[in-house]
Amino acid sequence: MISSLRGKVLLKQPPELMVEVNRIGYELQASMNVFYALPLESDAEVLIYTHLAIREDAHTLYGFVSLDERSTFRQLLKVNGVGPKLALAIVSGMTTTELYQIIHAADINALSRIPGVGKKTAERLVVELKDRLPKPSDTGLSHAPLRTANIDPADEALNALLALGYKAPQAEKMIAAYKDQGLSVEEMIRQALRSSLK
């Protein structure tokens, strides 16, 4: 089991990330929180916690910003009907603390706004996770602050939303409000995801 990677980022194309560790490049599907926390310096070393999913036709590595986020992803995988792609979309759309709050408040509407989560899946998430996830008051968890970069983020942000399961018209509408605000790719994705949950 590959539990974590420490190395340099060779490629970032949300949600795909390539990290070089001892001259070996590891490709992984990373949560958006990983991208928010990446350092601006291209040669900076990063630490990413990972989960390896093995199927008959593929070995896929998933990356997370914290042990807590990885643990939440693994709890989501235990819910009937939730696969790795949907679990990654859920942890990418909010912090773990926000997810805990939504689950414990049984906020079906907020969960249903996540792409791929219908009302039945949202209800199942609440029922199956309420006793497994810690209450928000029990956690002092937070993610690293967002970083900014001087690049045009609109296309990359749109591609990231499409990869998370949003339909093209919906993704374009989510991005449109933030195109001219000078935001980085990561910030634009985060703002778009937050707006979809309102």
Image (cartoon, rainbow, N blue to C red):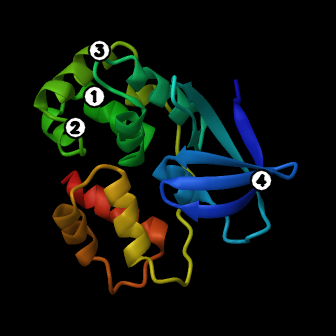
Q: Nearer the viewer, mark 2 or mark 4?
A: 4
User: Mark 4 to mark 3: distance in Å?
Assistant: 37 Å
User: Which of the numbered marks, if any, corresponds to residue 103?
Assistant: 1
The amino acid on which the numbered mark 3 sits, given as a three-letter code, is Glu
List the residue tagged with mark 4. Answer: 20
List the residue tagged with mark 3. Answer: 128
Q: Nearer the viewer, mark 1 or mark 2?
A: 2
User: Mark 2 to mark 3: distance in Å?
Assistant: 14 Å
User: Which of the numbered marks, if any, corresponds to residue 82?
Assistant: none
User: Mark 1 to mark 4: distance in Å?
Assistant: 36 Å
The amino acid on which the numbered mark 1 sits, given as a three-letter code, is Ile
Which secondary structure, mark 2?
helix
The amino acid on which the numbered mark 2 sits, given as a three-letter code, is Leu
If you read the primary sequence from the N terminus, does the residue marked by circle 1 or circle 4 appear first? 4
- Locate residue 145 relative to residue 118 in the image: left or right: right
Q: Quadrant of the N terminus?
A: top right
Q: Nearer the viewer, mark 1 or mark 4?
A: 4
How packed is label 3: few (under 14 Cα within 10 Å), some, or many (20 or more)? some
User: In the figure, 48 relative to 68: above or below?
Assistant: below
User: Mark 1 to mark 3: distance in Å?
Assistant: 10 Å
If you read the primary sequence from the N terminus, does the residue marked by circle 1 or circle 2 appear first? 1
The residue lying at 38 percent from left, 77 percent from top is 154
If you read the primary sequence from the N terminus, does the residue marked by circle 2 or circle 3 appear first? 2
How packed is label 4: few (under 14 Cα within 10 Å), some, or many (20 or more)? some
